[in-house]
Amino acid sequence: MQITKTPIEGLLIIEPKVWRDNRGYFYESYNAKLFAEAGINVNFVQDNQSFSQKGALRGLHAQAQPFEQGKLVRVLQGAVMDVAVDIRKDSPTYGQHFDIELSEENHKQLWVPAGFLHGFLTLEDQTIFTYKVSNYYDKDSEIGVMWNDPDLNIQWSRDIPESEFLLSDKDQVLSQFKDFKSPF
């Protein structure tokens, strides 16, 4: 397993070693010892999974304390553009984002610690996205920012027009980043 730092402190790309043969493939997606050696010392308490059609955009979301969540995200089927935005007020990269394509083909995962907004855009139909989280879901702790915030300037897709994005009602009315008060 290879764990690589990103330009934003705390975000890590995890690339498992994949063994392939005529039957298919096998890989280890999580190893507590290796993760701890990389600084990911969490107790995962909940696994979440979503199924989406091409163009579904989910985010940008987080949970405030005391229900903040670290997330280990990956794609089981299909592909996504995954985005994390640093909302740690004392961070030198506050307000900056990192994006990466996660897919069933590349098997990459992203570790998104607490203190980040998170979202993704599905790039293929029938995409299955899964994430392990370090705290339980709490509706009253939900926070978020508009996916198309001009200050964040996230380039979500090179192939899917924004007019075709599929959004929840909740994600269409989130605040702008300039009005967002980070709890981190």
Image: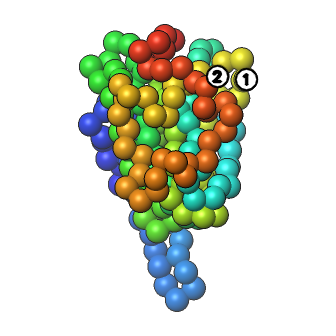
Amino acid marked by disc 2: Glu
Question: Mark 1 near mark 2, Cβ–Cβ under 8 Å?
Answer: yes
Amino acid marked by disc 1: Lys
* Residue 35 visible at all: no
Q: Residue 97: image x %, image y %?
A: 36, 34
Q: Residue 21: image x %, image y %?
A: 49, 84
Residue drawn 68% across the image and 55% down it: 51
- The circle drawn on residue 150 is none
Mark 1 neighbour density, 10 Å: few (under 14) some (14–19) many (20 or more): few
Q: CA distance from mark 1 to mark 2?
A: 6 Å
Name, please, the residue furthest toward the bottom.
22
Q: Residue 15: image x %, image y %?
A: 40, 57
Q: Nearer the viewer, residue 178 or 119?
A: 178
In the figure, 106 relative to 151: above or below? below
Residue drawn 64% across the image and 22% down it: 142
Q: Nearer the viewer, residue 134 or 38?
A: 134
Q: How is the image coloured?
A: rainbow
Looking at the rendering, which quadrant does residue 169 occupy?
top right
Q: Is residue 167 left or right of residue 177?
A: right
Q: Is residue 162 left or right of residue 166?
A: left
Residue drawn 46% across the image and 68% down it: 105
* Residue 53 visible at all: yes
In the picture, the quarter occupied by the N terminus is bottom left
**SS type, badge 2:** strand
Q: Is residue 42 left or right of residue 139?
A: left
Q: Nearer the viewer, residue 133 or 82?
A: 82
- The circle drawn on residue 139 is 1
Name, please, the residue furthest toward the front.
163
Q: Residue 64: image x %, image y %?
A: 59, 17
Residue drawn 65% across the image and 55% down it: 52
In the figure, 182 relative to 95: above or below? above
- The circle drawn on residue 142 is 2
